[in-house]
Amino acid sequence: MKKKILFCATVDYHIRLFHLPFIQWLKSQGWEVHVAAAGNSKLPYVDQQYHLPIHRFPLRKENILAYQLLESIIESNSYDIVDCHTPVGGMIARLAAKNRRKAGLKVMYTAHGFHFCKGAPFINWLMYYPIEKLMANYTDLLITINQEDYQLARQKKFKAADITHIHGVGVDTDQFFLVSKEQKNNLREKHRFPEDAFLLFYAAEFNRNKNQAFLIKVLALLKETLPNAILVLAGDGKELSHCRQIAYKMDVNHMVRFLGYQNNMNVLLQMSDIVVASSKREGLPVNIMEAMSCGLPIVAFPNRGHRELVLDGVNGWLECTEKGMAERIVQLAENPPLRFNLGKNGRKIIIEKYSQNQVLAEKRRVYQSIVNEMEERMEWTAH
């Protein structure tokens, strides 16, 4: 009999961004794949999609309807596995699936960075920690993508049947790769960036957590020492207009390029010199892994996800002050061989641990252990 799996998340573009390679592999293995999430974009390799009226804030009334609908979907389909993601999507899916677990349904939840962590606001601990602690009771396998979350789940005695760690969602190293100086210059010419500019790149939604204002203040410290620096910011969001105002106020608006939402990250990375990152909280940031895969050194604000990926003096540095980050940027601008060596080390780290092939192999092993357990239970029941 064909095995069936339901992927659940708050929004369908989460599935599109992070899980299609694995879904494609599942299809090649004969699985029937369903997806339940907010949104109506058509996902490839998926047999059935359900739109759920999920809201990303846990206490919104829309989530009651989403729970009722998802419970009905799970009850009417004989799923073998429910694989859920995102805090609210994971909460609703685990509640909706709890009764079917008694009949053998396996529930997996991947924490793409707990909202509570060292340095997180108290409100995050107050709201999200009790939810995740409780939901672990309805989880057969809790997957974390960084070591800090893994240790936290163990130390706080989350009662999932099993807790494991994998190295993120994987980076396509054939798409994100280092280019030659000539290719870099050609890309800059095509996108109207000066050949002699020193490009600092950051891709993220404009919100308070991503903290782009910090980078603009760093740039203000570079006006005299590195006048050819250009901060390239890709993304959109509610803090964008505020960041524009800061750039004008600090007289660096001529040194910042606000690109808006972009879907050509590999090209933007390949024409850049370094990547900077200012977010206060990350799980295991894909933007940093993609930059490392392109052979770029990283200068980032220290947080849980950045600490996992950026090793001081190996593939970049972690700096918590504007002055410290500015000094590292100047150091890299003045030393091209250092940039190359740090970037080469970063690419090596990605290939060895975080490439799409490596992560897919890890996930296949995780799934196989779940399938083996299901088959053993069926054999035991049959006897």
Image (spheres, rainbow, N blue to C red):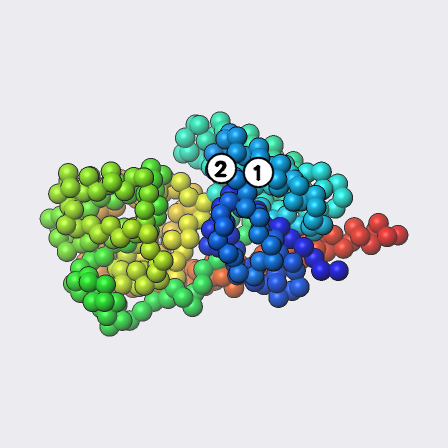
Residue 176 lies left or right of residue 352; in this view the side is left
Q: CA distance from mark 1 to mark 2?
A: 9 Å
Circle 2: element type: loop
Q: Is residue 175 above or below residue 217?
A: below
Q: Which residue is mark 2?
A: 55
Q: Would you say residue 129 is visible in this rendering? A: no
Circle 1: element type: helix
Q: Which residue is mark 1?
A: 66
Res. 100 image quadrant: top right
Res. 32 image quadrant: bottom right
Q: Is residue 375 above or below residue 214?
A: below
Please state which of residues 217 and 331 is positioned toward the viewer in this rendering: 217
- Residue 94 point in image, percent of width and height: 62, 39
- Residue 288 point in image, percent of width and height: 38, 53
- Residue 324 point in image, percent of width and height: 24, 44
Q: Is residue 332 above or below residue 241?
A: below
Residue at point 41% right, 30% down?
A: 121
Pointer 1 with pointer 2, Cβ within 8 A: yes
